[in-house]
Amino acid sequence: MALLQIAEPGMSTLPHEHRLAVGIDLGTTNSLVATVRSGVADTLPDESGQHLLPSIVHYQAKARPTVGWEAKQQALQDPLNTLASIKRLMGRSAQDVQTLNGQLPYQVIDIAASVPRIQTSAGAVTAVEVSAEILRVLKERAEASLGGELSGVVITVPAYFDDAQRQATRDAAKLAGLQVYRLLNEPTAAAVAYGLDRQDMASADGKVIAVYDLGGGTFDISILRLHKGVFEVLATGGDSGLGGDDFDHAVAEWMLRQAATTLTQDAQGLRQALIVARTTKEALSSTAAVGVQLGAWHGELNRIQFNELIAPLVKKTLIACRRALRDAGLDKSQIQEVVMVGGSTRVLAVREQVETFFEREPLVDIDPDRVVALGAAIQADILAGNKPDAEMLLLDVIPLSLGLETMGGLVEKIIQRNTTIPIARAQEFTTFKDGQTAMSIHVLQGERETVDACRSLARFSLRGIPPMVAGAARIRVTFQVDADGLLSVSAREESTGVSAAIEVKPSYGLSDSEIETMLRDSMQYARVDMEARRLREQQVEADRVLEALDSALQTDGEQLLTVAERQILVARRAELAAARASDNVRAIEQAIKTLEQAAEAYVARRMNVSVRAALAGHKVDEFSSETGFNRPCQN
Amino acid sequence: MLQDLPRDWFALFGLPAQFEIDQAALTQRFRELQARYHPDRYAQGSEQARRLAVQVTSLLNEAHATLRQPRLRARYLLERVGLSFNDERDTTHDTAFLMQQIEWREAIDEAEASAEPLVALEQLAQGLGAELKSLEEVFAGAWQQQAYQSAKTALLKMRFYERLLEDAQGRLERLEDKL
């Protein structure tokens, strides 16, 4: 009961409460949820003790989709309704998906639409909706395991994710009913989990590390400078479409070539080849050669052959490493530590080549599958306000330059890649016709000079520009990239101060109304869940009220209340405790209300005492069982 | 909190307004300010506080990036003493310098067409970096003598070299992408 818990005057009246916060690694292959308990970050298992949740969703007609291990079992029998590696489609255009189409055994429909959809027996779904299903399962796991509703989450994304991919991730979280504190870059999360900033450092300037993060479908390289809790990303690079999946494809293609096309290359055949390829790849991390069987074909793949198959892919990652070093203005020799993250760094050839490149043995101490979720949990705990003294500070960068379309289909960069975020840049535009009241701005992301070679993010149309002669209007457009790496745009006509209305047409991605519709649709399934949750919430609330009252009565009940008053409160308390034991949401709500009303006078008296005490120089802590306040930052 | 911060970026970081800069002091003060104003510190704050934190740190990042990078720092110094810049009209009429620029461009073309384009372009980029360094020294000297026009000329030349460097690096990256 908030009213019974009193804070010092002038401070927040909210006492410090431990907010439930988790970090989520929404991976291409597997996803995880982690939290900090008693100061230690740990991943949370499901009921059967599994920490990893395969990022696979199986859709079926007229039923809630299944997610994870259960869905994975359907991959072979029902490939078209079993969606895996969906992260590769996040924020991607229909065109991108077409190029991936050979690799993903799904039926993509609506190629012309801004958001590609996949046909399943439960209807057409977008990547955002599929990801939301995965997030929902992790949310339920966390809430069941922590016994309450989550205040907020930190979701990790590949550092190299562009604006559309980040936005899609945020949309998925919204759809899953999660409050996102922050989107955190995966390599940065890994650096946090390793805690390398805390190690003894000879140099006052800190320590420079490289995080090589090769997941199922994405690759990131980040160069960071660490200094006593400050994680400053100097440069980041990568490929948001390169990962262990591509190793599988290389092996699958090799097998299909060897098997001399006796196999049909339908969805099921491809799925099967991919599954065999994956097992083969994993086996080669511990043995030198593996027997392979695909349909009637038998063969063998040894490590040398495998390394050759994936060599061009590994080489690509090393080129990105070189570029990131160049962007950071550093030489390989200045890297003091290399950290390996992501399941695909288990591949021996990857480890060897990274070691050769950086001329340094990489760190692999923390489970490469879990390290990102652990780092996210640490940041979530801090953002939730559970660690008010934390010094940790993450200074990240924007991975790809932001630019505007100019004359002749060229792109003018306004924010260069590897600029520390948040960042705002303003650009002035003018009208070129008399009385022009609208203008259009095309925002792109990428490093190339032409519009075609960059990714179109959005078209903004500015309306309501005051009519003036050509060239007289000065429209200042501000591009703001926030700490999540997400772009927003605002515009103002400088001479009149009129702010222009901006209409955003995302090139890829869902509009707000589409998300609203999806939210409503998902509610149909969620109604039953909602009722169960409402009950759980009220029970938690009842427990809090009971505890607060008990602790208050113990502290000053004797001094501040008459015997009769105390008896009334004790009776109301018993009623609430009885209601709490039932499954009746309404009864619990009512009992809480009645008790709170009965305690009103008591609350007021406690408040007076605490104010007097504070004025007399006493600490409120002496009167309240609560210590530690959630003090809002005041500057 | 926005209004509490000094408008002058040297003052913001507690540094003297000059071209030579104490990078360690800049970094340290930057970290202190970030630690105080970063949006992560306001995750539980009001919507307004969070928005303000984004604005303040955007400004900090902009100021830090400007002072850290020699050419941007040089330009900021000149703007502070009232010199204005016009990106379209500001150019150099130094013919010898322009000839040199053409030669550099040709060298970049040749490097790209050579047998080892990656190595050649990388070497060229290093050469361009050295040219930039020596122009920084020219700027520093002119600035010290308050010869602002000469300082501005040096600065404009730096921009030429930066464009060459961007060109060389862009080509390098496109070649790498094709590997």
Image (cartoon, coloured by chain):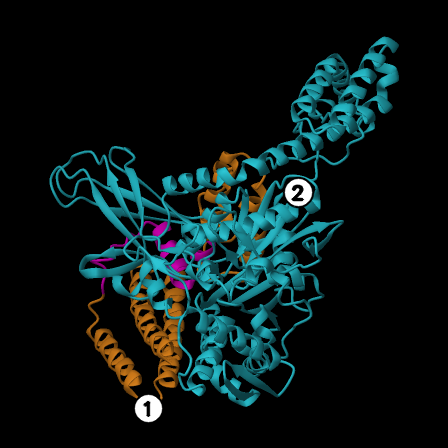
Residue in the picture at 56% in, 72% down: A344
Q: Is residue A358 left or right of residue A426?
A: right
Indicate the secondary structure of the residue bearing disc 2.
loop
**Residue at disc 1, secondary structure:** loop
- Residue A143 appears at what percent x and percent y? 65, 44
Residue highlighted by disc 1: B115
The image quarter containing residue B130 is bottom left
Above or below for A400 versus A574:
below
Which quarter of the figure is the C terminus of chain B placed in?
A: bottom left
Residue A217, placed above or below residue A60: below
Which residue lies at the image location 37% right of the left edge and 42% below the top edge? Answer: A514
The reply to whether residue A421 is visible in this rendering is yes
Q: Which residue is mark 2?
A: A20
Please name the color used to draw chain B: orange
Residue A18 picture location, percent across and down = 70, 39
Q: CA distance from mark 1 to mark 2?
A: 59 Å
Determine crowd level at label 2: few under 14, some 14-19, many 20+ residues with C-alpha closer than 10 A. many
Residue A567 placement, left or right of B122: right
* Residue A547, image x, y percentages: 79, 29
- Neighbours of disc 1 within 10 Å: few (<14), some (14-19), many (20+): few
Q: Which chain is assigned cyan?
A: A
The quadrant where residue A447 appears: bottom left
Q: Residue at x 63, y 62 (%)?
A: A371
Please tell me whether residue B42 belongs to the stretch shown in magenta: no
Tell me, yes or no, whether dots 1 and 2 are on the same chain. no
Q: Chain of mark 2?
A: A
A613 or B174: which is nearer to us? Answer: B174
The span picked out in magenta is B63-91
